[in-house]
């Protein structure tokens, strides 16, 4: 039973409780700290996010800049009440908007993005939190930097006062059996530990989704990104 399963009831409060319980028990079983829960809300209507926010969920992950902008406007939460994470691929021509809309960008994978985000971050909002996205399975079709590019990217981020390097994010190849993804999670954690030696403020290892969160937690995830198990199956675009 290594997966975070979708709770049987549709009620958002029930789902949030159930997912939180599953994360706690996975952490306990592995002797690891309980990870932060990022609610992945792509394609979900603002009302679904609001239902979770009213139950205390604060961190939301969106894949598209435009979609996040529309939902933030519709929800109208007071500044700072919610924490917005960009978890989708970012084009440099959207960096200005992303730097304004998000508190975290988890998908920094090339030097050009580092410069663009830093240039457009409003100093009054304080530094933008960033994660380096690593392509741990080295698939040609995927985003993320190669593991051997991590150090240079981290060094570039750390020279920017308006960016704050917080750690790594990974989306490994999905497997029918989540155990098969364990090696990728473990290799990512090893990179994370190397990074922490150089940058003491690094504290976030974002890995694990609905199907493989328990394996990711047992390999040291400090943040899991959960969509389906919280909101149910996504509406088709
Ligand atoms: C959609 C998505 C998730 C959540 O996936 P689920 O399987 O619905 O939990 C997590 N991370 C990223 C980057 C995503 O795009």
Image (cartoon, rainbow, N blue to C red):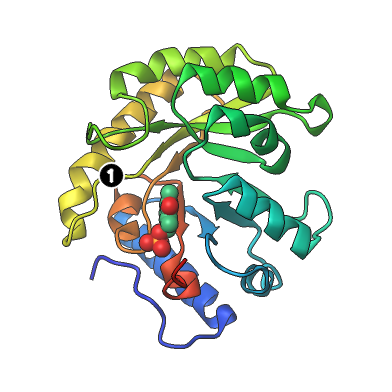
Q: Position of residue 111 (x, y in %)?
A: 49, 17
Q: Is residue 55 left or right of residue 28?
A: right
Query: Residue, x 69% and y 17% (percent of image)?
Result: 161
- State the residue at coordinates (41%, 74%): 233
Q: Position of residue 150 (x, y in %)?
A: 38, 20
Q: Nearer the viewer, residue 204 or 75?
A: 75
Q: Is residue 164 left or right of residue 6?
A: right
Q: Considering depth in this image, is 73 or 189 the residue closer to the camera? A: 73
Crowding around mark 1 (Cα neighbors within 10 Å: few <14, some 14 to 19, many 20+) is many
Horizontal side of residue 197 vs 142, given as left or right: right
Q: Could you say whether the residue bearing mark 1 is in a helix, strand or loop?
A: loop
Query: As displayed, is residue 19 above or below residue 94?
Result: below
Q: Residue at x 22, y 36 (%)?
A: 137
User: Which residue does the numbered mark 1 point to in the structure image?
Assistant: 172
The image shows a total of numbered marks equal to: 1
> Residue 220, image x and y in percent?
35, 44
């Amino acid at each position: 039973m290594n997966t975070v399963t979708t709770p049987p009831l549709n009620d958002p409060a029930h789902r949030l409780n159930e997912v939180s319980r599953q994360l706690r028990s996975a952490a306990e079983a592995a002797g690891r700290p309980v990870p932060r829960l990022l609610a992945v809300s792509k394609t979900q209507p603002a009302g679904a996010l609001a239902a979770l926010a009213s139950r205390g969920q604060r961190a939301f992950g969106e894949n598209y800049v435009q979609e996040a902008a529309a939902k933030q406007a519709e929800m109208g939460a007071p500044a700072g009440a919610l924490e917005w994470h960009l978890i989708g691929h970012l084009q440099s021509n959207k960096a200005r908007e992303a730097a304004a809309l998000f508190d975290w960008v988890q998908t920094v994978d090339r030097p050009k993005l580092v410069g663009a985000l830093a240039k457009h971050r409003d100093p009054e909002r304080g530094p933008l939190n960033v994660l380096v996205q690593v392509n741990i399975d080295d698939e040609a079709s995927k985003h993320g930097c190669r593991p051997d590019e991590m150090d240079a990217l981290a060094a570039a981020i750390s020279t920017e006062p308006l960016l704050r390097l917080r750690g790594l994010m990974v989306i490994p190849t999905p497997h029918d059996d989540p155990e098969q993804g364990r090696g990728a999670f473990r290799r990512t954690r090893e990179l994370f530990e190397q990074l922490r030696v150089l940058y003491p403020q690094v504290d976030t290892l974002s890995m694990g989704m609905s199907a493989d969160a328990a394996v990711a937690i047992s390999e040291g995830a400090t943040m899991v990104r959960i969509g389906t198990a919280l909101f149910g199956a996504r509406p088709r675009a």
